Image (tube, grey):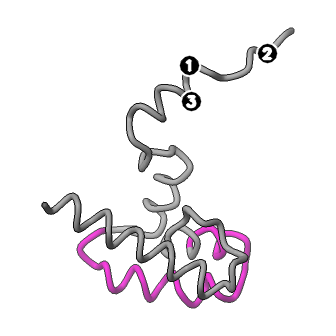
């Protein structure tokens, strides 16, 4: 039950981020991950949101950074999608 509630909260977070950005945001990105990404790029919205979010999640040290890194690692995907992605990478030729 806890996992289902977490999934619903993440989905709402992603929806809110897309709505805030008027559809310009990445649809699978949370506000936390986007805030870290935007701050890295020197964007004013990231500079404002990231400290606020990290303060709200004081019990989760470096919350925005960890969210961003989780997105990069695609760790939020179900295992079957991560396995498929790993096994179906295009081969590189020397």
Between disc 2 and disc 3, the foreground one is 3
From the top left corner, tell me how far across and down residue 53 is, in percent.
Answer: 42, 83
Give the image location of residue 28, x and y in percent.
55, 62
Identity of the residue drawn at 49% across and 72% down? 14
Direction right: furthest residue: 94
Magenta residues (range)? 36-60
Residue on which the image places disc 1: 87
Question: Residue beneath label 3, please?
Answer: 85
Mark 3 crowdedness (10 Å alpha carbons): few <14, some 14-19, many ≥20: few
Mark 3 and mark 1: span between their CA atoms?
A: 6 Å
Residue shown at the point (46%, 69%) measured from the top left: 64
Q: Quadrant of the C terminus?
A: top right
Picture coordinates of residue 46, whole percent (x, y): 61, 81
**Residues at badges 3 and 1 in contact (C-beta under 8 Å)?**
yes
Mark 2 surroundings within 10 Å by alpha-carbon count, few (fewer than 14), some (14 through 19), many (20 or more): few
Is label 1 in a helix, a strand or a loop? Answer: helix
């Amino acid at each position: 039950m806890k996992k289902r509630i977490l999934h619903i909260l993440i989905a709402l977070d992603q929806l809110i981020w897309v709505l805030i950005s008027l559809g310009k945001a990445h649809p699978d990105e949370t506000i936390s991950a986007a805030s870290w990404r935007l701050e890295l790029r020197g964007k004013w919205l990231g500079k404002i949101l990231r400290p606020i979010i990290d303060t709200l999640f004081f019990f989760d040290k470096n919350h925005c950074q960890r969210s961003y890194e989780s997105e990069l690692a695609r760790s939020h995907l179900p295992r079957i999608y991560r396995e498929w992605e790993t096994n179906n990478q295009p081969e590189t030729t020397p």
